[in-house]
Amino acid sequence: MGRVTRAGLIALAAALLGGCAADPPKSRELVVLVPDRDGKVGSVVVNAPQGATTLDKPYTAVRMEEGRKADAPAAVSQDELKKRFASAIAYQPIRPVSFLLYFQEGTDEYTPESKEAFERVFAEIARRKVAEVAVIGHTDTVGKGDFNDMLSLKRAERVRNDFVNRGIPTNSINVAGRGEREQVVPTADEVNEPRNRRVEINVR
């Protein structure tokens, strides 16, 4: 019925039944264009036998009934949207998030700031009924490649173990070490760069 022409989120109401008991039920639909989670608005073309209607402004809607031309686009308030689509909104998955934790040079010890940040990461994981967590360790370029491969994995395992000790299931956490190969701040060899001594945590 609709065709998305740019990025956007389309909310579709369930079909409603109308008409007399003796008449075949007619389907009614409401199509609403809302911004995505980043506030971007795309467009949607709503096709009907009597013609097409384009929605390209946030919180605009078109109402359609079987056998009738679609209504002209009209504004829909956010309150009305929440009421009409409360069930669908409630069942939307929690959006994926990413975090960075940083480490002391040559060790798997958190920096003081990252000790505090760890609590925020844990809270985000714990609030999800089912979480998939990817933990990827990295190093700066100080030291030999083999050592940094080992150290990056050790950092990732440290984070995983800290989550597990707080009650997160082991089987929901995947760990990997990338050594010094994926630097946030590209440097020459043997450069002490704190921003490269990190663990990336992706939660979904």
Image: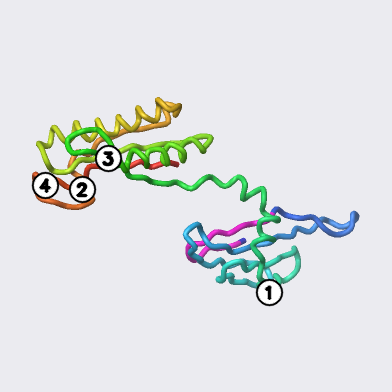
User: For the point 28% across and 37% down, which residue is it?
Assistant: 110
Q: Is residue 183 left or right of residue 169?
A: left
Which of the marked residues, 2 or 3, is nearer the chain's N terminus? 3
Residue 174 appears at what percent x and percent y?
35, 32
Residue nearest the observer in this picture, 156 or 73: 156
Residue identified by numbered label 2: 183
38 versus 107 height, above or below: below
Q: Is residue 166 left or right of residue 79?
A: left
User: For the point 79% across and 59% down, which residue is it?
Assistant: 26
Residue identified by numbered label 1: 72
Mark 2 or mark 3, which is nearer to you?
A: 3
The local crowd at label 4, few if under 14, some if 14 to 19, many if 20 or more residues have their Cα within 10 Å, is few
Disc on res. 111: 3
Residue 143 appears at what percent x and percent y?
10, 37
Which of the marked residues, 1 or 2, is nearer the chain's N terminus? 1
The magenta stretch is 2-13
Q: Which residue type carries mark 2?
A: Gln
Residue nearest the observer in this picture, 79 or 35: 79
Name which quarter of the figure residue 82 lies in: bottom right
- Alpha carbon of mark 1 to alpha carbon of mark 2: how far? 52 Å
Disc on res. 191: 4
- Alpha carbon of mark 2 to alpha carbon of mark 4: how far? 11 Å
